[in-house]
Image (cartoon, rainbow, N blue to C red):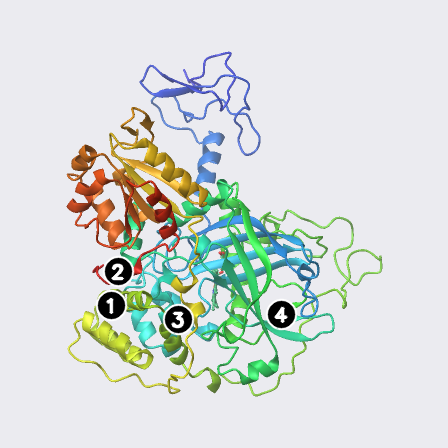
């Protein structure tokens, strides 16, 4: 006899309120109860049993006739789409852009015509090199792609958190990406630039030297997406109603200020919480702390471009903010997480060529190449030409065109006429007034494959970047270069890199060569244009110089033990929350601890699960007996030792001293260690935390 269902007769099949019961063969059956919806196939057919395939007899072969099984497995087998060839790992959120004032003088883009205009937005942040499942704290550029659903069509600003790029011409893009991705024979390293192929390419590509300074800086290990800048990178154009063009560069400035982690911390975060950046964005938006950026624009005319010391079409150069001040024009607020990651974040398709009337391109050869690549890549990834029918990519303005058919067409023309011109008076027509008009720039010249002479200086702005960093930041760059090059197995590549560094900063080259154990310095690399040393430092390029002066949006990890002082914890918690920051409690067991006054302190993490690298500052509220007990736990000692080594502010009750000492931290080592026995100290702890890190400590610590 063929038994096809294990469900009791008379019970409605539902996916709610299910009860598990063991069948006679010991297998688990789910019995549905209540009035929830009945499970269906994708064709809408009602399903009677979703746990047993159709067989001949209880122990017999499975029948191909089981259409429900076949459909379920068929769909599962096809769940994946190709990951992005670059920027595969990303995380997105919805929000809006709000225009401050009319920019009609510069652009006829509708989004900039009215003060207070709100435009729906979707933003996807990403790393570049790693696969979709790689960790968040790779040393890497972060993508910062903004889709603005304007009333005149989608405008995508597909930028990064670094304002320059590795290469000047798009034809080199496959090479730089092949070089940084896992090496093709061994398929490692994942999400790392620290390997031979990457540095081989870089050391043979002097135009990448400015970008190298940025990716070796802490910009490449941001603390959170919320604390990083975004840049459109290229020079674009605004075009006004009179068809006059103004060059424009886009900058997104985080309201919460800039912040990064240190490398030793990044490595540990990747182990402790590979989703650190995702979780941070999710938590911030879900808790109503909506991340915000201000859009600022650098506007300039042809005369400025002609007189500027570098070519504004060269994506390896910036215009320092001190030379040309970015003007605030609006704000971007992220206030809603996607309901479904795949449907929205994975399927979103950004394209540099998506610009509304009033925004136009420059001749930057990197941008021109990108304008081809982004449309092309969507066809492969999303599987057909109708990817604009997917809700996340669909414009939120009226659409009228004669495109039709193709795979998965969701929007199809109705009626007889699907072409124009037609004599039936049906369908849309072009509008020379309202439609996109390319800026009529005069161009002439021979067809050549040449790099402009004005693109030849590869070192001066790299040097300017290095000179604009504070001493701890310069130290981080030297250490990052040392780390990365120490992973390079071919000595000649290391030497070639040091030869380039000699053109940037001799001290930097010396330090790196010394730390790599190089016996002698190579000759400086040949330079196509002599490096300049007359560029003023630009304080806007330093993260530390552009810190927040507030602890808002940050997180304190409070380690508690049995017998901890619940009153101090409460006061600390309320002072931190008043500052707009969050507190998470860590205890020996996740169930929590009993405080000295008999109350119960709940915890979010056990010590292993909540290492101090996950927090911006820490507090140790421990009884002496509790601290003594913790001295025997490696995770507790690491909690303290790491917080100290990473220059974090540490508040502690006197009971915590044995743990500090056992972790090798002198409780009076510096002003970053703040005793909590005096209640006023809570205020000074919170005030200190606004500085985020005590960098002076770093000089005394070998990371
Ligand atoms: Fe790109 C994705 C940013 C140069 C080709 N790029 C991609 C994304 C960002 C950037 C943020 C991810 C978008 C998302 O979240 O879905 N890319 C940049 C920046 C560049 C840059 C700031 C230099 C200034 N890119 C660049 C070049 C090319 C590409 C020169 C090719 C000629 N980029 C692509 C791509 C991707 C992409 C292959 C992969 C997935 C996608 O487009 O949708 O077309």
Q: For the residue carrying disc 1, how many other residues have a C-alpha within 10 Å: few (<14), some (14-19), or many (20+)? A: many
Residue designated by label 1: 482
Which residue matches tag 2?
Answer: 698
> Given contact means CB atoms under 8 Å apart, are the residues at marks 1 and 4 in contact?
no
Rendered location of residue 235, percent (x, y): 55, 72
Image coordinates of residue 261 in percent, x first then y, are 34, 56
Task: Using the numbered discs, state the Cα–Cα distance from disc 1 to disc 4 in whole angstroms.
Answer: 41 Å
| Distance between mark 3 and mark 4 Cα atoms | 25 Å
Tell which circle, 2 or 1, labels the residue nearer the N-terminal end. 1
The residue nearer to you, when weighing 60 against 21, is 21
Nearer mark to the viewer, of 3 and 4: 3
Q: Earlier in the sequence, mark 4 or mark 2?
A: 4
- Residue 78 visible? The answer is no
Viewport quadrant of the N terminus = top left
| Element class at badge 2 | helix
For the C terminus, the quadrant is bottom left
Q: Residues within 10 Å of mark 2 (few under 14, many from 20)?
A: some
Say which mark, if any, is on residue 211: 3
Say left or right for 388 vs 142.
right
**N-term mark: 2 or 3:** 3
Residue that carries the numbered disc 4 in the rendered image: 360
Location of residue 302 in the rendering, given as x and y in whole percent from the top left corner: 61, 81
Question: Which of these two is toward me, 137 or 673?
Answer: 673
Relative placement, left or right, of 377 versus 694 is right
- Crowding around mark 3 (Cα neighbors within 10 Å: few <14, some 14 to 19, many 20+) is many
Sequence order check: which comes first, mark 3 or mark 4? Answer: 3
Q: Is residue 91 left or right of residue 616?
A: right
Q: Are marks 3 and 4 in contact (CB under 8 Å)?
A: no
**First of labels 1, 4 by sequence position:** 4
- Mark 1 or 4, closer to the camera: 1
């Amino acid at each position: 006899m063929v038994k096809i269902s294990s469900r009791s007769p008379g019970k409605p099949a539902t996916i709610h309120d299910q009860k598990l019961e063991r069948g006679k063969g010991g297998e688990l059956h789910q019995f549905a109860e209540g009035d929830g919806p009945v499970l269906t196939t994708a064709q809408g057919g009602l399903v009677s049993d979703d746990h047993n395939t159709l067989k001949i007899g209880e122990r017999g072969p499975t029948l191909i006739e089981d259409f429900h099984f076949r459909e379920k497995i068929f769909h599962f087998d096809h769940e994946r789409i190709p990951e992005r060839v670059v920027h595969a790992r990303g995380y997105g959120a919805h929000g809006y852009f709000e225009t401050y004032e009319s920019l009609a003088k510069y652009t006829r883009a509708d989004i900039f015509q009215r003060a207070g205009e709100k435009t729906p937005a979707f933003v996807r942040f990403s790393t570049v090199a790693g696969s979709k499942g790689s960790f968040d704290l790779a040393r890497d550029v972060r993508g910062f792609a903004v889709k603005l659903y304007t009333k005149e069509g989608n405008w995508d600003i597909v930028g990064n958190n670094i304002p320059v790029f590795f290469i000047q011409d798009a034809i080199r893009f496959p090479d730089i990406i092949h070089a940084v991705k896992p090496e093709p024979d061994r398929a490692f390293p994942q999400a790392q630039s620290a390997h031979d192929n990457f540095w081989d390419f870089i050391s043979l590509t002097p135009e990448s030297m400015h970008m190298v300074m940025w990716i070796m800086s802490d910009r490449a290990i941001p603390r959170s997406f919320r604390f990083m800048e975004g840049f459109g990178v290229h020079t674009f154009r605004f075009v006004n109603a009179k068809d006059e063009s103004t060059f424009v560069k886009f900058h997104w400035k985080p309201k919460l200020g800039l912040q990064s982690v240190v490398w030793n911390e990044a490595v540990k975060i990747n182990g402790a919480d590979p989703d650190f950046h995702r979780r941070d964005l999710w938590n911030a938006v879900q808790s109503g702390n909506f991340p915000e950026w201000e859009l600022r624009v650098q506007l300039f005319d042809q005369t400025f471009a002609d007189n500027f010391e570098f070519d504004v079409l060269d994506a390896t150069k910036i215009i320092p903010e001190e030379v040309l001040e970015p003007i605030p024009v609006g704000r971007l607020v992220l206030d809603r997480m996607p309901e479904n990651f795949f449907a929205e974040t994975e399927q979103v398709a950004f394209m540099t060529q998506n610009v509304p009337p009033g925004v136009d391109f420059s001749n930057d050869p990197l941008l021109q190449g990108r304008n081809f690549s982004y449309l092309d890549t969507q066809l492969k990834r999303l599987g057909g030409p109708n990817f604009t029918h997917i809700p996340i990519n669909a414009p939120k303005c009226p659409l009228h065109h004669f495109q039709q058919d193709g795979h998965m067409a969701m929007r199809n023309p109705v009626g007889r006429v699907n072409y124009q011109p037609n004599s039936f008076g049906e369908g849309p027509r072009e509008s020379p007034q309202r439609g996109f008009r390319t800026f009529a720039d005069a161009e002439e010249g021979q067809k050549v494959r040449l790099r402009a002479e004005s693109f030849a200086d590869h070192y001066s702005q790299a040097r300017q970047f290095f000179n604009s960093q504070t001493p701890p930041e310069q130290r981080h760059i030297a250490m990052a270069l040392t780390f990365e090059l120490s992973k390079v197995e071919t000595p000649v590549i290391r030497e070639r890199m040091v030869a380039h560094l000699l053109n940037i900063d001799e001290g930097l080259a010396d330090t790196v060569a010394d730390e790599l154990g190089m016996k002698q310095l190579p000759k400086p690399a040949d330079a196509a244009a002599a490096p300049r040393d007359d560029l003023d430092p630009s304080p806007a390029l330093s993260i530390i110089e552009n810190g927040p002066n507030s602890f808002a949006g940050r997180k304190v990890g409070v380690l508690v033990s049995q017998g901890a002082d619940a009153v101090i914890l409460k006061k600390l918690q309320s002072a931190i929350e008043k500052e707009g920051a969050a507190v998470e409690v860590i205890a020996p067991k996740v169930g929590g601890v009993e405080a000295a006054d008999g109350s119960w302190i709940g915890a979010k993490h056990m010590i292993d699960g909540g290492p101090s690298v996950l927090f911006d500052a820490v507090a140790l509220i421990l009884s002496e007996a509790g601290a003594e007990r913790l001295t025997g736990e490696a995770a507790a000692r690491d909690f303290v030792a790491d917080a100290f080594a990473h220059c974090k502010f540490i508040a502690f009750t006197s009971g915590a001293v044995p743990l500090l000492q056992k972790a090798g931290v002198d409780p009076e080592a510096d002003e970053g260690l703040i005793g909590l026995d005096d209640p006023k100290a809570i205020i000074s702890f919170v005030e200190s935390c606004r500085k985020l890190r005590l960098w002076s400590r770093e000089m005394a610590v070998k990371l």
